[in-house]
Each structure stands twice: as C-alpha cells, then as structure tokens.
Image (cartoon, rainbow, N blue to C red):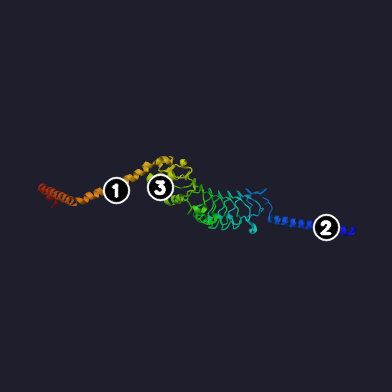
Amino acid sequence: MTDCYSFKIKMEINRKQLISKRCHFTLGLMCLFVLSADAYECPDTCKCNDRTVICAGTEQIKLPLEVPRRTQTLTLNRNNISVLTERAFSANGTDMELLTLSLEDNNIREIKSCAFCGLPRLLSLELSYNRLMVVNPDAFCGLGQLRNLYLSNTLMASGASQLQSALSTDSLCNLQTLDLSGNHLKSIPLNRFGNLNLTTLILTNNSIATLDKRDLQKFNEFKEIRVNLSQNPFECKCDKLKEFYDWLKNSRQCIDLETLKCAQPEEKKDIPLVKVCKPQDLGSYVLLGIVLALIGVVFLMVLYLNRRGIKRWLNNIREACRDQMEVYHYRYEQDSDPRLANVAV
C-alpha cells in the first residue's frame, strides 16, 4: 500500500511539473510574439523614451522609417525629407500605434499616395514650414481618426491648388482642426466643410481680401465651425463688403473679428473692419440705388408723355436757328469788302 501511495504521489508531482513546463512554454511563446511584434529597435540617430521617438536635425533619416511598433509620439523635425513615400512610417506593412506625428521644417515637396497608410490611430499630424508642391489626391488616405492637421507656412501655389482634392475625400471624416495660416491663399481651398467635421479653421496671415458668396454659404451650412481670419489684406469697399460684413456681424463664427483690419483703399488702411462700414452705411447704398432708379423711371415717363410737345419744341428751335443763320449769311454778303473779292480773283 505504501509503495502504491508513493507511486501516486510521484505521478501527481510529474503531472504538475508537466503542467508547469507547458505554462512556461506558452508564456515564452507569448513573450516571443510580443517581442517580434515590437522587434524594431530605436534608430541610432534618434532618442527613444518609453513610447516617444525623437529624430531631429540629423538629416540621415530614410523612409520608410523603422521604429518600435508601440511608439505613440514620433518627432522628425528638420531632417530634410523631400518626399513622403507610400507607407513612409509603416515598415513592412505593419500598422503602427502612432498618435502624434511631427514633420515640421523638413523641406517636404511631395506627398505621395497613401503616405500615411498604416497609421490608423493617428490623431495629430504636423506638416508646417515645408514647401509642398505636389499633394496626391490620396495623400491622407487611411487617416480616419485624425483630429488635427497643421499646414502652416507650407503650401506653394501648385500644392495649394492640389490640396483641395486631397481634403475633399472622406478619408479625413473626423478632422476637427485645420491650420492653413501663412500660405498666401486668396480663397479657401475646400469644396465643403461637413465631410471633415471641422470645428476650427485657421486662415490667418494669408492673402484673402474678402469671402465670396460660395464660402459664406458653406459657413452658413456648417454652423459648428469657428474661423480665424486676422492678418489678411481685406478690401474695405462698403458696396462690395455687405454680404461679408453681414456674415461677420451675425454668424459669430469668426472668433477674431475685433482684430480684422483694412488694407485697401489706402485712406482706410489699418482701420478695424467693424468700424469702416456701419449697417446704415451699407443700407444707404441700396436706398440710394432705389431712389436713383425711381428718378430715372419718372424722367422716362415724363419724356414719353410729352414726346409730341418735345418734338414740336425741338422743331421750333431748329427753325429759329436756321432763320438766325440766314440773317447772318445775308449780312455777311452785304458787308463783304470789294477789295477782298478783287484779291481773291
């Protein structure tokens, strides 16, 4: 009995050891899987801290960049990256966990199609102080969670014209803040605002003289948006400013209204826009136009009703002028000098 009991105890110990080994093996496999998923080490020219990677001013960055998959903040400022290639931040097609990506002051000239694919969780993208000339229509594809896009002082003329189609897609359906300041824009490069779900649109320090009817209609359709318009060269001619002025005063969508100043004409330069054209001044142009139109109609009616009398009066004047001219002609013939006639002969 003792031997049988000892055998059972040994069997139980062996079973527990086997289970323990299996658990350790499973745990090892899991660790190996985690390590393989985050296999990329910190690049030599970068600084890595927890889930933050900073590679600034090295000019040795090559895309696609390999960083730990669990990285949430990636800063690549001042690295002279001229072209953002396809999946530029997602090596080997692996989706990254990035939440913030900064590419400020990199002399970026072109963003290719699907450049940010593989960053499905990205919330903030900084592209300011570059020289964008080419923006592919699918440049922002795969950024369905993006909330903030900064494009300050970065658009060349060709890039600004191409940006419109890149922003018109549904790829940025959750975008809330769009910074387009300092880009010499004369109009807003957006076909519509609703597809972006915008709440803040920054248009400061551009070349906007006024907002046309289409832009104002877009703002009126999308009430949630708030706009910054300061440091633009506004043309303060009250007859052309009425709709824009009405929108500024009534919509409350321009959050820096008090800082808007006139640039043209010269006599109104640097005067606050809200003080240039008062509502009664704007309305007076309409009233004046109506009064002049009524005067013109009355004048035409008087001419029409007195057309026969006017015709008779004109005929009398013509006859009187003709009689007077005949008198002058007769006197000229009577008073002509005979010696002048001889000389003429």
Residue 12's tag is 2
Spatial CA distance of label 2 from label 1 is 109 Å
Of residues 312 and 175, the one drawn nearer to the viewer in this rendering: 175
Tag 2: residue type?
A: Glu
Residue 83's tag is none
Chain-order first, disc 1 or disc 3? 3
Tag 1: residue type?
A: Ala
Chain-order first, disc 2 or disc 3? 2
Crowding at dot 3, Cα within 10 Å, few <14 / some 14-19 / many 20+, comes out as: some
In the rendered image, residue 47, in percent from the top left (x then y), is placed at: 67, 48
Residue position for label 1? 293
In the rendered image, residue 143, in percent from the top left (x then y), is placed at: 57, 54
In the rendered image, residue 300, in percent from the top left (x then y), is placed at: 24, 50
Residue depth check, mark 2 versus mark 1: number of the one nearer the observer: 2
Of residues 263 and 26, the one drawn nearer to the viewer in this rendering: 26
Of residues 128 and 4, the one drawn nearer to the viewer in this rendering: 4
For label 2, the SS is: helix
Residue position for label 3? 243
Chain-order first, disc 2 or disc 1? 2
Tag 3: residue type?
A: Glu
Is residue 62 shown left or right of residue 201? right
Find out whether the residues at labels 2 and 1 contact each other: C-beta distance under 8 Å.
Answer: no
Spatial CA distance of label 2 from label 3 is 89 Å
For label 3, the SS is: helix
Quadrant for the N terminus in the image: bottom right
Find out whether the residues at labels 2 and 3 contact each other: C-beta distance under 8 Å.
Answer: no
Crowding at dot 1, Cα within 10 Å, few <14 / some 14-19 / many 20+, comes out as: few
Of residues 201 and 47, the one drawn nearer to the viewer in this rendering: 201
